[in-house]
Image (cartoon, helix red, strand yellow):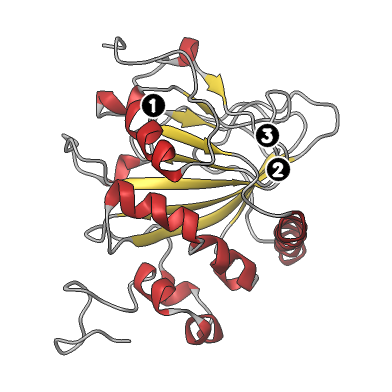
């Protein structure tokens, strides 16, 4: 039943308390212009440089399961690329939302970049909570923090969501919810967060020449395996430089799970 689904987005807010209410009611919140201009420019340069490096190395960057064509580029394992991405992963506002939605400790399941180019088709509508066995529990198990690195507009492929779909506690069925999609439009530097049951997809980029980049740290409760295998993926210097908070997010600093001889490995 789609009766729980709404047709509109919550109003943008700079109040974390209001943002948490929006996450509960709508499944998402929008917080404008969180990153200052200097930080935004540095993150944008680092993300596009990482994408260029992947192309030069011949790494696979497109054609993944949720994408319909090669115009949508994925950039993986951002923690190895630049310390700026670790700063985004443990940004105080992001972690305030993480703590409020799924609690603490939490795990950073993945942090990746998504660059949608002109001509890119819309992605596959889905919820991120596929890692949870069915039936899903009533309590949410994950949250995505989307950092808008470029302006998000309907024309350049802004993420599309079905507000309120998190109340259905399941993935969409084939063709379901497509008539209720709403584009999340926000200026560069904004944050929008959405919980792991919310139906969403990458929007179609119908612009002539505009790319739309975002960085997506995804967090889960600590009982699930992370999407990125940090123990194999991360360079040693990244782990050595990590803060106590980041080590907890990466499961290098264990609480109950992941112990070595009964103690935290870090």
On the image, the x and y values in percent for residue 157 come to 67, 30
Numbered circle sitting on residue 37 = none
Binning the other alpha carbons within 10 Å of mark 1 as few (below 14), some (14 to 19) or many (20 upward) gives many
> Which quadrant holds the C terminus?
bottom left
Quarter of the view holding residue 221 = bottom left
Quarter of the view holding residue 223 = bottom left
Q: Disc 2, disc 3: CB below 8 Å?
A: yes
Residue under numbered circle 3? 152
| Residue appearing at x 40%, y 14% in the figure | 6
What is the CA distance from the residue labelled 2 to the residue labelled 3? 7 Å
On the image, the x and y values in percent for residue 22 come to 40, 31
At mark 1, the secondary structure is helix
What is the CA distance from the residue labelled 2 to the residue labelled 1? 22 Å
Residue under numbered circle 2? 188
At mark 3, the secondary structure is loop
Numbered circle sitting on residue 26 = 1
Pick the front one: 152 or 111: 152
What is the CA distance from the residue labelled 1 to the residue labelled 3? 19 Å
């Amino acid at each position: 039943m789609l009766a729980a689904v709404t047709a509109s987005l919550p109003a943008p807010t700079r109040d974390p308390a209001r943002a948490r209410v929006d996450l509960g009611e709508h499944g998402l919140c929008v917080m404008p212009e969180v990153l200052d201009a200097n930080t935004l420019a540095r993150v944008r340069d680092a993300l596009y440089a990482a994408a260029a490096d992947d192309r030069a190395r011949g790494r696979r960057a497109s054609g993944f399961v949720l994408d319909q064509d090669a115009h949508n580029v994925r950039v993986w394992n951002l923690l190895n690329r630049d310390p700026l991405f670790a700063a985004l992963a443990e940004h105080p506002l992001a972690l305030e939302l993480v703590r409020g939605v799924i609690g603490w400790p939490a795990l950073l399941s993945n942090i990746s970049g998504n660059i949608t180019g002109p001509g890119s088709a819309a992605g596959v509508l889905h919820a991120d909570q596929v890692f949870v066995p069915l039936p899903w529990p009533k309590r949410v198990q994950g949250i995505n923090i989307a950092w808008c690195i470029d302006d998000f507009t309907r024309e350049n492929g802004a993420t599309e969501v079905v507000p309120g779909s998190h109340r259905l506690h399941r993935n969409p069925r084939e063709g379901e919810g497509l008539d209720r999609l709403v584009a999340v439009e926000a200026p560069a530097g904004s944050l929008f967060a959405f919980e792991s049951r919310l139906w969403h997809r990458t929007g179609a980029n119908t612009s002539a020449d505009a790319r739309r980049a975002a960085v997506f740290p995804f967090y889960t409760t600590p009982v699930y395996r992370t999407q990125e295998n940090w123990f194999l993926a991360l360079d040693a210097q990244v782990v050595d430089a990590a803060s106590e908070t980041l080590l907890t997010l990466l499961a290098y600093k264990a609480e109950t799970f992941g112990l070595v001889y009964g103690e935290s490995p870090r």
